[in-house]
């Protein structure tokens, strides 16, 4: 069981300003690494890591977190151990229906309250779509954590390609 929990955090995106595509890939044990998307010039900072002189690392992960269990907790704890502030996107009921064809057992507001109560979680936001680029544009996180269920999927391959450009 421990091996499965350890492999749950498989991918990390790291920011590195001005580097070429090859040098912004960071190897991650048990997973793959993605290049960091570049911020358009002149864009205003939205989170503390973009404020001049701030050194905080913001991490981001998402999930439905329905029927919260120990695997969810371990994923979030491991993600938090790799950043200063952890932002968690909680999948909305509507997105869950769109993606999985069913409503979560636990309603969105309650799932968000449960995840928000964890010491390892600093900020929760609604996840209203699956577009990780949109999330990065809105939140400007430094690292992104995803479970093994994403690795190798067509959506993940397209996402890696987009961030590499």
Image (spheres, helix red, strand yellow):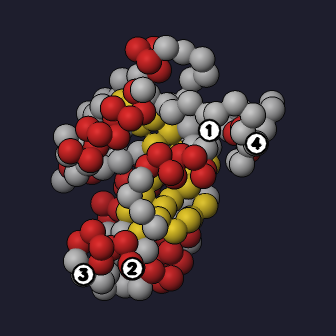
Residue occupied by mark 1: 57
Left/right of residue 55 with respect to residue 91 in the rendered view? right
Give the label, 1 or 3, closer to the camera: 3
SS for callout 4? loop
Q: Which x, y percent locates residue 99?
A: 27, 69
Residue occupied by mark 3: 102
Q: Which x, y percent locates residue 50?
A: 72, 38
User: Dot 4: few (<14), some (14–19), or many (≥20) neighbours within 10 Å?
Assistant: few
User: Dot 3: few (<14), some (14–19), or many (≥20) neighbours within 10 Å?
Assistant: few
Give the label, 4 or 1, closer to the camera: 4
- If you read the primary sequence from the N terminus, does the residue marked by circle 4 or circle 3 appear first? 4
- If you read the primary sequence from the N terminus, does the residue marked by circle 4 or circle 1 appear first? 4
Measured along the vertical axis of the image, is residue 95 above or below residue 32? below
Q: Residue at x 44, y 49 (%)?
A: 132
Q: Residue at x 38, y 58 (%)?
A: 130
- If you read the primary sequence from the N terminus, does the residue marked by circle 1 or circle 2 appear first? 1
Q: Which x, y percent locates residue 29?
A: 31, 29
Q: Which x, y percent locates residue 110?
A: 48, 83
Q: Which mark is residue 81?
A: none
Give the label, 4 or 2, closer to the camera: 4
């Amino acid at each position: 069981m421990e091996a499965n929990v350890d492999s749950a955090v498989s991918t990390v995106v790291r920011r590195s300003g001005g580097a070429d595509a090859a040098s912004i890939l960071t190897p991650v044990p048990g997973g793959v690494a993605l290049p960091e998307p570049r911020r358009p010039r002149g864009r205003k900072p939205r989170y503390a890591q973009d404020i001049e002189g701030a050194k905080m690392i913001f991490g981001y992960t998402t999930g439905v977190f329905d029927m919260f269990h120990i695997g969810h907790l371990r994923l979030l704890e491991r993600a938090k151990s790799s950043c200063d502030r952890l932002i968690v996107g909680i999948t909305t009921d509507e997105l869950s229906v769109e993606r999985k064809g069913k409503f979560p057992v636990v309603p969105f507001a309650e799932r968000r309250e449960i995840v928000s109560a964890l010491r390892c979680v600093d900020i929760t936001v609604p996840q209203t779509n699956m577009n990780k680029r949109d999330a990065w544009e809105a939140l400007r996180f430094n690292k992104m954590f995803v479970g093994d269920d994403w690795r190798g999927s067509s959506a993940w391959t397209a996402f890696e390609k987009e961030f590499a450009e």
